[in-house]
Image (cartoon, grey):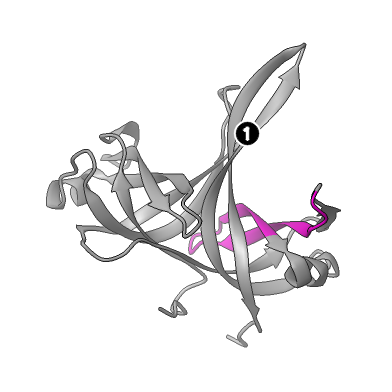
Amino acid sequence: MRMKQKNNQAILRGIVLDLPSISHEVHGITFYRFPLSVPRLSGKDDVLNVLVSSDLLERCPLSLQMQVEVSGEIRSFNNRSGVGSRLLITLFALSLSPTQESYCNQVYLQGVICKPPILRRTPLGRDICDVLLAVNRNYRRADYLPCIAWGSLAMYCSQLQVGDQIVLNGRLQSRQYTKNLNEEITEHTAFEISIMSLEAPSDT
């Protein structure tokens, strides 16, 4: 599927791991959060956060292990609670429905490089590049989305400059890592967009 109508689009098909819990309320609308498991071809699962309005939940009530399709936009916001990651990444749902179709994890983003890319190498010798992408919303805000590229794409991304515009197709993924703080090891989860391909920016 080719997603080109907007600069921030994502489609996930996966399994509901837990029932929605209240996240927050804006302009009288209550929003809920739930974890969605999307298996990879490798057999590993990405467990991703979905933010959904009460209106969508009324039209599509969720149950445990239900298979659903969610389409929407990748959103970021700063976590000031002091617990967990400082940058929280979610899929803001614009549609929600039951599905029996195969699992899917597709992201289309068009944005601007907002920090110098960082090229590094894994212990196994693979090149990897960290990219922070600013993607504008419609109302004078932007989402700051961490992305990673591998191999030849990593080498290409490492040459990009702050202010360069890129268009990418990829997938939203979760990654577990550990931190050692005051001799105490804690486990954390990071969310990022794995870049699968790049396209030339459109003129519009």
Q: Classify 24 as above or below 47.
A: above
Q: Which residues are magenta?
A: 124-148
Inspect the image, locate mark 1, and give the three-letter code of the amino acid beneath it: Arg
Q: Label 1: which residue?
A: 86
Hey, which quadrant is residue 163 in on the image?
Answer: bottom right
Seen at 67% across and 28% down, the residue is: 178
Question: Where's the N terminus, which quadrant?
Answer: bottom left
Mark 1 Cα within 10 Å, few/some/many (few <14, many 20+)? few
- For this view, does 174 lie left or right of residue 66? right
- For this view, does 151 lie left or right of residue 28? right
Q: Position of residue 176 (x, y in %)?
A: 59, 37
Seen at 84% across and 57% down, the residue is: 119
- For this view, does 109 lie left or right of residue 132? left
Question: Where's the C terminus, which quadrant?
Answer: bottom right
The residue most toward the bottom is 203
Q: Position of residue 137 (x, y in %)?
A: 51, 61
Q: Position of residue 185 (x, y in %)?
A: 68, 18
Seen at 36% across and 45% down, the residue is: 36
